[in-house]
Amino acid sequence: MPLLLTFLPSYDKIKKNQHRFSKNRIAYYTSCAVTRTNFANGQNSSITICAAAGGGMEIIMAKIKWRGGALIAPLPPVMVSSGDMENSNIMTVAWTGIINTIPPKTYISVRPKRHSYNMIKESGEFVINLTPARLVKEADYCGIYTGAKVDKFEKCKLTKEPATEVKCALIGESPLSLECKVTEIIPLGTHDMFLADIVAVDVDEELIDKEGKLHLEKAGLAAYAHGEYFELGKRIGKFGFSATKKKKHRNSPKK
Ligand SMILES: Cc1cc2nc3c(=O)[nH]c(=O)nc-3n(C[C@H](O)[C@H](O)[C@H](O)COP(=O)(O)O)c2cc1C
């Protein structure tokens, strides 16, 4: 069946048709073609239109192409403490992650205008405090107000606890804190990236079982995705589970 692309659907129409996409159904199409629409705002869409075996055409997939953007999700909305036990500050950071295993290395990307920026730059130290869902309001507060004007430890009623390897205070209510020493500052554009060694980890003892195993799933950690906070939900697998063979039952018949 010849494929005639005589129309370009509107953005609304593309969206409405997105739910019709199903991988299993591709087998029933006789031919497919991709078309592109450029929108005035710089976005463009790529639409796959297929001719069905029984006649007619159907849009089976629509992607809207945007300019490059910071859109990885979910991210951890961590609370970064800096300074020392007397002069401490907290800022919320989502641009963070692990970048090496041995030695353990992390980064935080911070805008130079943040009050925390100079505190971290001058001391070369910071602490990453993981945020559980029960502390999300505090984390949000620490991500809106500046330590130049408010004492966020006091306002959020968070407890300063001494770290072992750095002078910064840990947030006592956080289930896990990473003590970090800056090794490099990389200017990237809007943000400067503080590369750091993780020199100690402080874990809430309630998360460690008798065998010494860490149960981070019990911390009820929060996630940040495109401007919204979420609580981690049900476990849906574990590392390597896709390759794990099912154990044979001892009494099952041999094939
Ligand atoms: C969820 C969330 C994530 C944030 N992530 C970052 C980040 O990665 N880097 C950054 O520079 N600012 C980030 N901010 C903004 C700072 O936390 C905010 O400007 C804060 O008030 C800075 O505090 P300070 O001036 O006391 O250092 C984030 C804010 C929120 C609410």
Image (cartoon, rainbow, N blue to C red):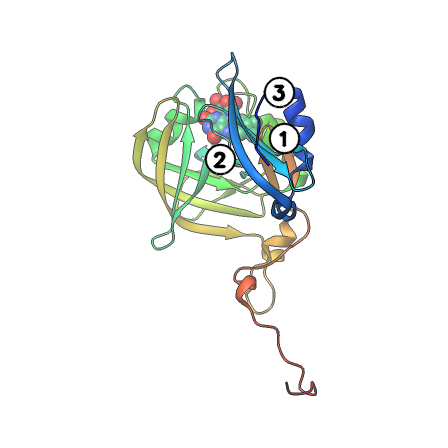
Q: Is residue 180 above or below residue 10?
A: below
Marks 2 and 1: which is nearer the front?
A: 1
Q: Where is residue 122 shown, x and y percent of the image?
A: 33, 29
Check disc 3 and give the amino acid type: Tyr
Q: Where is residue 152 shown, x and y percent of the image?
A: 56, 27
Label 2, residues with CA under 10 Å away: few <14, some 14-19, many ≥20: many
According to the picture, the residue beneath numbered tag 1 turns out to be 228
Q: Is residue 203 above or below residue 34?
A: below
According to the picture, the residue beneath numbered tag 3 turns out to be 11
Check disc 1 and give the amino acid type: Glu
Q: Residue at x 55, y 66 (%)?
A: 212
**Along the line of sight, which residue is nearer the eye, 148 or 222?**
222
Label 1, residues with CA under 10 Å away: few <14, some 14-19, many ≥20: few
Measured Cα–Cα span from mark 3 to mark 1? 25 Å
Check disc 2 and give the amino acid type: Val
Q: Residue at x 43, y 35 (%)?
A: 84
Tell me which label, 2 or 3, sits earlier in the chain: 3
